[in-house]
Image (cartoon, grey):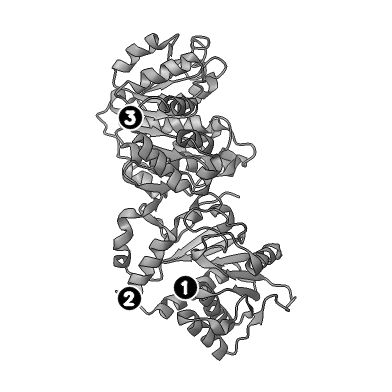
Amino acid sequence: MIHRYNDAMSDYNCKLYTAEQVRGIDYAAINELGIAGYELMCRAGKAVVDEAHSHFPFARHWLIMCGPGNNGGDGYVVARLADKAGVRVTVCSLTDPEQLKGDAALAYEDWQAAGGEVCEWPSADDAPFDLALDALLGTGIDREVGGKFRQAIAYLNQLNCPKIAIDIPSGLNADTGSVMGCAVQSHNTVTFVGRKRGMYTADGPDYCGHIAFDDLAVPTEAALKYSSDAGSLLSPDFLTQVLNPRLRNSHKGSFGHVLAVGGIKGMSGAIRLCGEAALRSGAGRVTLATDPAHADLVNLSRPELMVKAIGDNADLQPLLSGDHVLALGPGLGGTDWSGALLKTCLGAQAAMVVDADGLNLLAKYSQENAVLHENWVLTPHPAEAARLLNCKVSEIQQDRVLAAMAIAKRFAACVVLKGCGTVVASPSGEYAICPSGNPGMATAGSGDVLTGIIAALLGQGLSCFDAAKAGVLAHAVAGDLAAEKLGEMALIAGDIINKLPRVWRSVAR
């Protein structure tokens, strides 16, 4: 399944929040702006019913699983509105609804007043359901799910009908996207007030399915307190914002010179992919600094690439005196030759993208040496990120946003933590998540293509953070276009390059 950006709003500055921040926005709306909490709950319920009718119009029997707290309250509002619309509703509660408080209690009372009934868990109703709705746990979960809630989640997951999660799939951590032992595997998720960042990275996309967002008409001033710490969700509009039209009075020097360093013997393909991706992303010139074993051959099918044979760092040094953007790492290897080139490049003043073997060498080098470089982008996958932070891969995946921020702070670099919901972080603490891309892009050479794209954008004057975000987004969208035509299993890195012209053409002004 290809997960795409599905929110109702598609502006380039869509904000991402932690669960605590969303609770703060909710509190401000109620206690500072005077919007009744139950009014917000009713708006949320309507949004869920509208989503259900839109996507599953023939579902006539709904199961709604309710838990304690306001998430359960949302479920009772959904039940009342669905029943009013003529839907047969079965409501099952895992806790005594008479113990509900506040707005959730009001929602339950209104459901009762409408003639609604509630059955206890486990439900005695064995009738087949056309749709199941998850209103069990909400965003507050911070520990592994157990007991009857674990049983209820397992029950929902085995039902042979679509599932809609209300606000977030129960069991999914709203901040990290990690599954807390188990989680509801939803086909659709309707989320409210603020987008939760965990829904877009790690396990989030697989468990949320199609994501619909409704701000419940909460005024933007309710979120002002949290705006500076919020992340952003990248959409294609971002490319239009940061890519300027090209002046007619331009030349190849106007669009940057990318110097790609790597390609040890036997790894010429990596540097070749990086170079072509840079050309296809607007670089005025691209030079491959690579192993003499294949220097005469690597550009045979792409003569636009310039090539320099690099026997040692002495051969590389003269190339660094020009105005280049460095792309270091594709096929670089881990030999003495590789390490010497890394050290030489680290001493250069040029803007730089470091990937693949360059990151592994950097991880080793930084353990014994101070690494000082400005204006650079690091693009690790989770295993490379773990080496940079000297920790386990599982620790990286437990909180991908914090891991990316930690690397950015340690190396004073912009960081692209690749994977499902790629995270881009800056040294100042900003972050963004890309919701585009697909599993077919997990193929050899895909990262080399990304390195070339980001390097080309740096050469055209984008800041490190903007180049990283734009590069990640263009790479992901191109991958989705390739998968639409070829499928995910057949996709190779060159297919991503082939779709880049369509990406850039779509955002041209």
Q: Position of residue 428 (x, y in %)?
A: 31, 44
Seen in the picture, residue 101 relative to 462 is either above or below; the reply is below
Residue 44 has which mark? 1
Residue 288 visible in the displayed image = no
Depth check: 337 or 316 in front?
337
Mark 2 packing: few (<14 Cα in 10 Å), some, or many (20+)? few
SS type, badge 3: helix
Q: Amino acid at mark 2?
A: Asn
- Which numbered disc, 2 or 3, marks the residue closer to the eye? 2
SS type, badge 2: helix
- Which numbered disc, 1 or 3, marks the residue closer to the eye? 1
Residue bearing the label numbered 3? 459
Mark with earlier residue (2, 3): 2
Q: Are marks 1 and 3 in contact (CB under 8 Å)?
A: no
Identify the residue at image location x=41%, y=62%. 20
Residue bearing the label numbered 2? 31
Q: Position of residue 192 (x, y in %)?
A: 45, 66
